[in-house]
Image: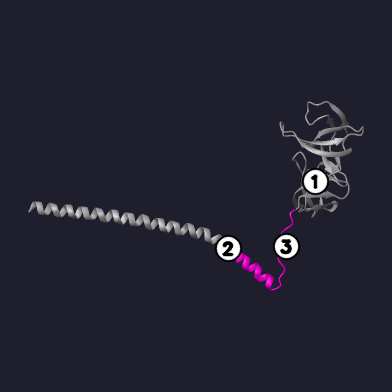
Amino acid sequence: MKRKVLSTVILLTVGFGIGTVTTTSANAETNYVIASVEWVLSKISPLEQKVNQLEQRVSSLENGEAPTAPPVQYSSVFVNKVTAVKKGASSTYDTFFNAPQGTILSYDSTYQNSVTGEKWYIVKLSDNRLGAIKSTDTSLQSQNPSSFSKVVFTKNAIIKRGAAASYETIYTASTGESLVYSSTYVNSTTGEKWYIVKTPNGKFGAVLSSFAEVIK
């Protein structure tokens, strides 16, 4: 009798064990399938959105609607007449330098003075400082200037024979003076940006970009 009961218990135990293994295996396979489906859906959803957008554009064109023009990305500010580059968006701020007509400055953003109502362009100078210039005296350009002709000095500067401080000085430029621009050079050792210019005596030299701005 004891043997019979023992045999029955063993069979039940083995049976439960097999059932557990089978159930666990089935759950694992089910979870894998669910995970795979979710992965596929995550890839399909963005494609559906793109298809819907294309369908909407095609529909609007078929109905004779004009496509929406992409926003213009401005990159530079062109100075139309001699204008002060200020340290803030108000005439009361100190002046960095007076930008001559033709100066091209790197555009950063637009600011509206809530007190005066004036619109100012925030510009990035060659030494990475930010300044502000009145929009009424300037105009925005949507493309980077392809060529420059002169370098105007924003402060007194020394012109070196080469693009490094260790070279000898060949000329001293005054604030507001302009020289013929040749090219831009970045010193691979120091990371400094230099403008190669032609001095009044016909020699070529280099000046740190933080002392000048390039103009057309």
Residue 205 disc label:
none
In the rendered structure, the answer to whether residue 157 lies left or right of residue 70 reads right
**Alpha carbon distance from label 3 to label 1:** 26 Å
Q: Residue at x 9, y 51 (%)?
A: 3
Spot occupied by residue 140 in the image (x, y as percentages of width and height): 80, 53
- Identity of the amino acid at label 3? Ala
Disc 2 or 3, which lies upstream in sequence? 2
Mark 2 crowdedness (10 Å alpha carbons): few <14, some 14-19, many ≥20? few
Which marked residue is nearer to the observer: mark 2 or mark 1?
A: 2
Question: In terms of depth relative to the viewer, which is nearer, 136 or 72?
Answer: 72
Q: Which residue is mark 3?
A: 69
- Identity of the amino acid at label 1? Leu
Q: Residue at x 11, y 54 (%)?
A: 5
Q: Which residue is mark 2?
A: 49
Spot occupied by residue 180 in the image (x, y as percentages of width and height): 88, 39
The range drawn in magenta is 49-73
User: Are the residues tagged 2 and 3 within 8 Å (C-beta)?
Assistant: no
Question: In terms of depth relative to the viewer, which is nearer, 6 or 79?
Answer: 6
- Identity of the amino acid at label 2? Gln
Specify the farthest residue to the left: 1
